[in-house]
Image: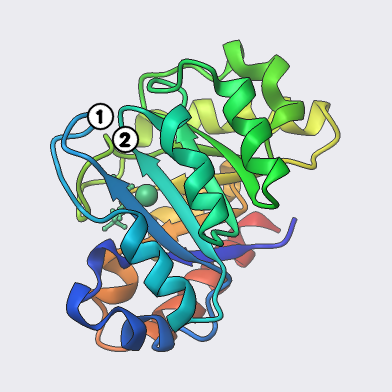
């Protein structure tokens, strides 16, 4: 299980996104949090910023859509060149159709579950997804405290993914730090989003290396 680190630009300086992306050359992805003031009580950025960022960095963009109408908007993020587009199960009305559209447009398809959403009802959808995102905070804001209550679900998700061949990546997002990342890796996550722990650090590149090392130690 290869560890991947996806720094969240939510904690970066939005006026200098190209520079901030360049500050983490050792990251696997750039995590882009799209919020619409409806699905979550916060507003961030949308398609125009993703289109510009696509041209400003070679890093693949990991777009996490925290929006009310993902069925309507998700394909446009894939068309804009996102490497991965993740929709929330709580918001999608036609998740199978939308996940298939994302894939057909050449991006990886992700399905996100908020902390209180059970993973078991989505077992039959695993064949439709490339990544399952388990939120380890309530979606909406960076800098929140990691929710340990999600760890048992993460273990169950790892069992389900392995039962179906282990192809699906298991991502955690929210409150991931040098300390909490170990618990996530032990429980079976392999893709780690970190906002404050990377862009809030004095040396973001070193922070990525440290997170990766901690996850590799704990997950092996
Ligand atoms: C929260 C976002 C996260 C956020 C994580 O709703 O989905 O990606 O940027 O920030 P930290 O790592 O600071 O908890
Ligand atoms: Zn996110």
Residue 177 picture location, percent across and down: 36, 61
Task: State yes or no: Cβ of the residue under disc 1 lies below 8 Å from any atom of ligand 1.
Answer: no
Name the quadrant of the N terminus: bottom right
The residue indicated by pointer 1 is: 39
Q: In which quarter of the image is residue 130?
A: top right
Which element type, helix, strand or loop, lies under badge 1? loop
Does 55 sit above or below residue 119?
Answer: below
Q: Residue at x 49, y 47 (%)?
A: 76
Could you say which is closer to the camera, residue 106 or residue 20?
Answer: 106
Marks 2 and 1 sit apart, C-alpha to C-alpha, by 5 Å
Counting residues from the N terminus, which is met first, the one under dot 2 or under dot 1? 1
Residue 31: tell me if it is visible.
Answer: yes
Residue 67 is tagged as 2
Q: Residue at x 79, y 33 (%)?
A: 162
Could you say which is closer to the camera, residue 103 or residue 128?
Answer: 103
Residue 188: tell me if it is visible.
Answer: no
Q: How crowded is mark 1: few (under 14 residues within 10 Å), some or many (20 or more)?
A: some
């Amino acid at each position: 299980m290869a560890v991947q680190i996806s720094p969240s630009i939510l904690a970066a300086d939005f006026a200098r996104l190209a520079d901030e992306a360049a500050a983490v050359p050792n990251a696997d992805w750039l995590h882009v949090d799209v919020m619409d003031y409806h699905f979550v009580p916060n507003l961030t950025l949308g398609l125009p910023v993703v289109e510009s960022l696509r041209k400003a960095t070679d890093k693949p963009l990991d777009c996490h859509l925290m929006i009310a109408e993902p069925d309507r908007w998700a394909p446009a993020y894939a068309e804009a060149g996102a490497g991965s587009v993740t929709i929330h199960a709580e918001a999608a009305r036609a998740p199978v159709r939308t996940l298939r559209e994302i894939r057909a447009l050449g991006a990886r398809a992700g399905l996100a579950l908020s902390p209180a959403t059970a993973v078991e009802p989505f077992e039959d959808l695993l064949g439709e997804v490339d990544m399952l995102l388990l939120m380890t905070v309530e979606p909406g804001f960076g800098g929140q405290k990691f929710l340990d209550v999600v760890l048992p679900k993460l273990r169950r998700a790892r069992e389900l993914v392995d039962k179906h061949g282990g192809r699906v990546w298991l991502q955690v997002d929210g409150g991931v730090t040098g300390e909490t990342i170990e618990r996530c890796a032990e429980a079976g996550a392999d893709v780690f989003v970190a906002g404050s722990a990377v862009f809030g650090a004095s040396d973001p590149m070193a922070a990525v290396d440290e997170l990766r090392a901690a996850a590799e130690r704990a997950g092996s």
